Amino acid sequence: MGSIFNIEPDDPAPDYRQLYRQAREAILRGDFPAGSRLPSSRELAAQLHTARITVVQAYRQLEREGFVMTRPGSGTFVATALTRADVEPAGAGRGLTEWGVRAARLGAGRERPADEDRVPETRPAEIDFSFGRSFAELFPYDVWRRLLARYLSTDDAMMARYGTAAGYLPLRETIATYLRASRGVTCDPRQVVIVSGAQQALDILARLLLVPGDEVLVETPGYRDAFSLFRLHDARLTGLPVDEQGLPVDRIPPGCRARLVFVTPAHQFPKGGTMPLERRVALLKWAATRGALVIEDDYDGDLRYEGQALTALQGLDSERVVYLGTFSKVLFPALRLGYLVLPPRLLEPFIAAKDLVDRGAPTLTQAAVADFIEEGHFERHLRQLRRVYGRRRTALVEALERHMPGLLAYSPVAAGLHVMTALPPGSEEGRVVRAAAERGVRVYPGAPFYLEQPSPPAILLGFSGLDEDNIDEGVRRLAEVIP
Amino acid sequence: MGSIFNIEPDDPAPDYRQLYRQAREAILRGDFPAGSRLPSSRELAAQLHTARITVVQAYRQLEREGFVMTRPGSGTFVATALTRADVEPAGAGRGLTEWGVRAARLGAGRERPADEDRVPETRPAEIDFSFGRSFAELFPYDVWRRLLARYLSTDDAMMARYGTAAGYLPLRETIATYLRASRGVTCDPRQVVIVSGAQQALDILARLLLVPGDEVLVETPGYRDAFSLFRLHDARLTGLPVDEQGLPVDRIPPGCRARLVFVTPAHQFPKGGTMPLERRVALLKWAATRGALVIEDDYDGDLRYEGQALTALQGLDSERVVYLGTFSKVLFPALRLGYLVLPPRLLEPFIAAKDLVDRGAPTLTQAAVADFIEEGHFERHLRQLRRVYGRRRTALVEALERHMPGLLAYSPVAAGLHVMTALPPGSEEGRVVRAAAERGVRVYPGAPFYLEQPSPPAILLGFSGLDEDNIDEGVRRLAEVIP
């Protein structure tokens, strides 16, 4: 009997721990049925040439975990018939489900210190071409404070309420009106659902629509957080390289069986093209043929500095397109408020799911945002952002032309909060990023946004957080490190 | 060929729609291979004794969806070889996954107009024994406004940031300190994760730990939103009827293979008992034996009107217990801020998952709550709530004794925001609820909280929203309708 246990001097685990593990395994294997007696600590210690206390400690651990009982004077007995299924939680790795393992893997090292980027912080950059967000300096705090205060009174029962899962109805109405006018989105206010942001919208949609192994068609380069989200759901990503006009619909592989298509037609993220009408129609036709749902992420639709935006995809086919919008870019990210416009058939399941997994968004914030839009502050704020950011974008484009003429290609649409530029072929983007950092300039590598690796060398330059002088100076220093 | 289509006069769908559906089916079945010609609209109309426009409309619909192409002058041809897999999204019902179908089913009619209850609104009750929430009248709005305003300034970059997925660190530190002192929770601030509420905490835990068919052990009566959440994940619920001391651990079925145990040890919801130490130790031992994780929902732990709370379960075994807390009850529900204390092994996957599916909670609110606690407003507010609600609870208990002596049993622990009372055996709770409503008094049926049906007749009476006179008057009227 002693032969089934042994203590390995090379095992870094303490002796009692080795013994405990082996005894636990033996019980789970069925070597010791319920009620059977384990060798006494004296016997076992002698067989294993170890101290009796080692065996006692191992047995105590087994007892604490309910594997054995000690009857004083008669010995240690196996408590109940246990199998591995009784003690090992489902799934792999640390008792996690497959979903959990994917979450842990995808999320490893992903927690952001401040905003979206994952570039490790070295010393603070003098000139940081950070992107993807609006900056606090332009936000009308006085107005916002006043709107919040309006609802912070004992007379209003709003604060005592959980709110509905779909969102605060006056905000949904305001958004519907705004989207009809500014984007040609066709929707009833009840199709507008308030969420915490694009990630939550995508997560619930994926749960409603994707089974493991389903194909999802995405743009590359593209929105990496959406890639992660779909991968979390065990989707197979098919990345279609974009050109200056976004997703080249005619190049969708004939065998593509995508359930979902994730696109940024107004202003391709991060490259910057706009999808022309013919491609939009072709995409919708393709989707209709395949029974696919198109997710239109209009992440920066409000920030267009020249020309008029095309009608949203959603406006062309409200049955087959989910429209995603956010307030994080133009109000402030910490608001955690986004919205989506759903086809009627998905409305009920989506709201039910949102209610079950998260309930509704904070009512107070929703009410303040509704008033902010309704009373014209939103339009005013947007006009100011467009003026200031438009100037900064022009400064960046001019600086690129001045300091690196003919060297960098940048996307032609004047919109958004950043410019993505290709680096000369053969240059190494990591080296450029590091060399710029040594000159006090922070720029962002393009590789994380590409599905295909290695990706063509590129960098992202956000312009919303820098004044014109800094933009020029930053590009001047950047030019010095471009090979 | 015409024989495979037919128009049913009894079918409520329009003729062209019937035809479209049948043709679509035929194409998907492979009856018309790619490139094959459909019968001309003239031929088919004649065969079916219908108008030609009917066939044309059906063909147009097929064309819009990409099934056929029309070549002017030569006819209508099947566009590409399509199979059902190309056009039907995965899963059952409206193209939803099984998860989506469960969400829609569980959520049907569940959207709440205002707070947690699902009782259909008839006329507003004069006296509403609503429960589960604190009321706006007692909240120190002036303090809250001041704290929010503090962070609403251009000098603070906080608003421009997304924040980290785990939550705002100063708030996590404050909560850890508070829980150590008030509940005996043993944790490092990094084990505290901020979520939008209990539903989000449970949803992420379920995704990390449950596979379809897994068993979950719950109290009955119990927290129905947790039941729904676990059912959404296709868990099998085992409900153990509680007694005056909460979950009777010695009556857990020997064959129970639960991965998760969901309990409310401090103040059983909704019945009101407190789990004594022996049961807590027994539960933890049972869980350790089975490799189960215990979720301790301390939903109203701050609202105790007499005596001292026991150490949290989490304080007895921080490896095996997840502690859930919320600010919705004592601050205000619309805040949408809760937290959980996780065992170290679950921390990384949980935060990764939270980041992927929802990112972080609004930083501004978190900062304001941290200061609210840190600067003593929370304790002061709690003291006031305990004083006012303690009086109201006493009033309710006295009114029950006065107006229905010996008739109703109610839970003995002076805590929380409601009392659950058993109705006399054989009485019908629905009738009592309706009869009370006719007298202008709203009370809440117990049945929705029970897993087993029919359940023992019971009603819930919330006391936090009513003054003492109304409580007495409400119970007086209620007594008239108790059989």
Image (cartoon, coloured by chain):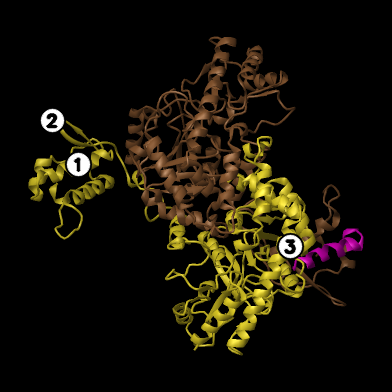
Chain colours: A yellow, B brown
The chain that hosts pointer 1 is: A
Please report contact status of discs 1 and 2: CB closer than 8 Å, yes or no: no
Image coords of residue A338 (percent x, y): 64, 56
Sooner in the amino-acid sequence: mark 1 or mark 3: 1
Image quadrant of residue B154?
bottom right
Observer-nearest residue: B455 or B324? Answer: B324
Q: Which mark is residue A314?
A: 3
Against B312, residue B242 (above or below) is: above
The residue where tag 1 is placed is A59
| Residue at 68%, 19% in the rendered image | B436
Q: The residue under label 3 is which amino acid type?
A: Gln
- Residue range of the region highlighted in magenta in the rendering: B45-66
Viewer-nearest of discs 1 and 3: 3
| Residue at 48%, 82% in the rendered image | A432
The residue where tag 2 is placed is A73
Against B307, residue A381 (above or below) is: below
Image coords of residue B457 (percent x, y): 57, 21
Q: Is residue B62 left or right of residue B144?
A: right
> Does residue B258 show up?
no
Mark 1 surroundings within 10 Å by alpha-carbon count, few (fewer than 14), some (14 through 19), many (20 or more): many
Classify mark 2: helix, strand or loop. loop
